[in-house]
Image (cartoon, rainbow, N blue to C red):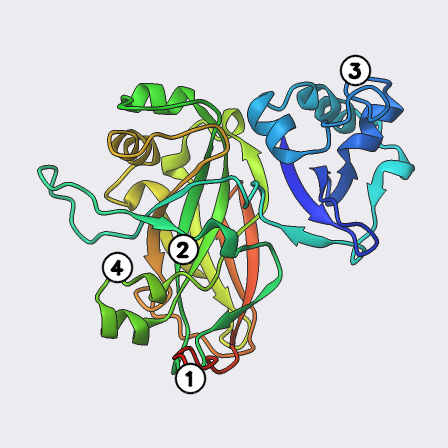
Amino acid sequence: MKIARVLQPASATPILALEQSGWLYDVAELDRHHDTRFAPERFGGAGDFHTRVCALGAAGMAELDEALRAGSRPRDARLLPDSFLWLPPCDTERALWVCFPHADTRDPASEPSYALGNARALLGHREVVPFPAREQSPDLEVGVAALIGDELYRATAAEARAALVGFTVLASWIARGEEERGGRFAARARDFGAQLGPWLVDAAEVPDLARVAVRVRAAHHGGWVPCGRVGDAPLRIDEAIAFASDHVRLAPGDLVSVGLISASAARLPLAWGSDVEVQLEGIGTLVGRPARGPDAVPWRAD
């Protein structure tokens, strides 16, 4: 099951959707078509991502997905291409985002480092990412993010695995100039924009995350650059969640991400205004375009 969150220009309310065979289907319309208990006329909160996916554990959505797989694909529920804006598959206003940047060490005695990311700056698939104006060149870190569906505090890795709702692709854009000025974990180096998407894949459909292949491609550069597998990272996602929960109380709808490799480490040069594709095999392909943002506004008082 692939769960997307999108926005249509005529509406201020995001739409919850399911992907099947290259098409997105409006979950509310599917509920209406199949006359489920979550049809909008019966359950007003069914279209809200946090309510339906996080609080209710995607209740009823597996049945809708199975109907789509079986060929029941009502046209009135289909979202036409270019009729919507992709949003991150999470509630950015409610999510706590704990991010573990890529580490170069596999020393089992060392503790991982993490930061609290800016969830409100998360962007969706096919977005333009505005960098700080003084940045000389863009870089990104490919990662995998997990959505949590239960409260976790001082959890074990096994408890963390049991709380997983699903996985999505992370493109964490990095301003290396800000990083050099403020240190590796400088907030300004990463707080301006990261991308998630294009959808959330049910954790049950990714039985062996470690074997998922990672690839990156830049439109101006040519073909795909293989970057190994998720399991090559020194930190597993369930270990990251467990470690984070020892320090931060996690709740349904929160995100934990692990960095896998950077574009610069993969020797893939990036360019302003050129599309970059990040792929986790079986999970999704996320596209973003780095661009220089506007100059900073004067912030000193007169």
Compare marks 3 and 2 and give the one earlier in the sequence.
3
Circle 3 is placed at which residue position? 37
Measured as percent of width and height from the top left, residue 292 is found at: 50, 79
Q: CA distance from mark 1 to mark 3?
A: 58 Å
- The image quadrant of residue 141 is bottom left
Total numbered badges shown on the rendered structure: 4
- Image spot of residue 218 (x, y percent): 50, 69
Give whichever of 148, 288 is nearer the camera.
Answer: 148
Q: Which residue is mark 1?
A: 302
In the drawing, what numbered circle is on residue 220? Answer: none
Residue at the limit of the structure toward the left, as seen here: 109
The residue tagged with tag 1: helix, strand or loop?
loop
Amino acid tagged 4: Phe
Q: In screen coordinates, is 21 left or right of 240? A: right
Residue labelled with disc 2: 142
Residue extending farthest to the right is 76
For the view shown, which residue lies furthest in the front direction?
A: 302
Of labels 3 and 2, the one closer to you: 3
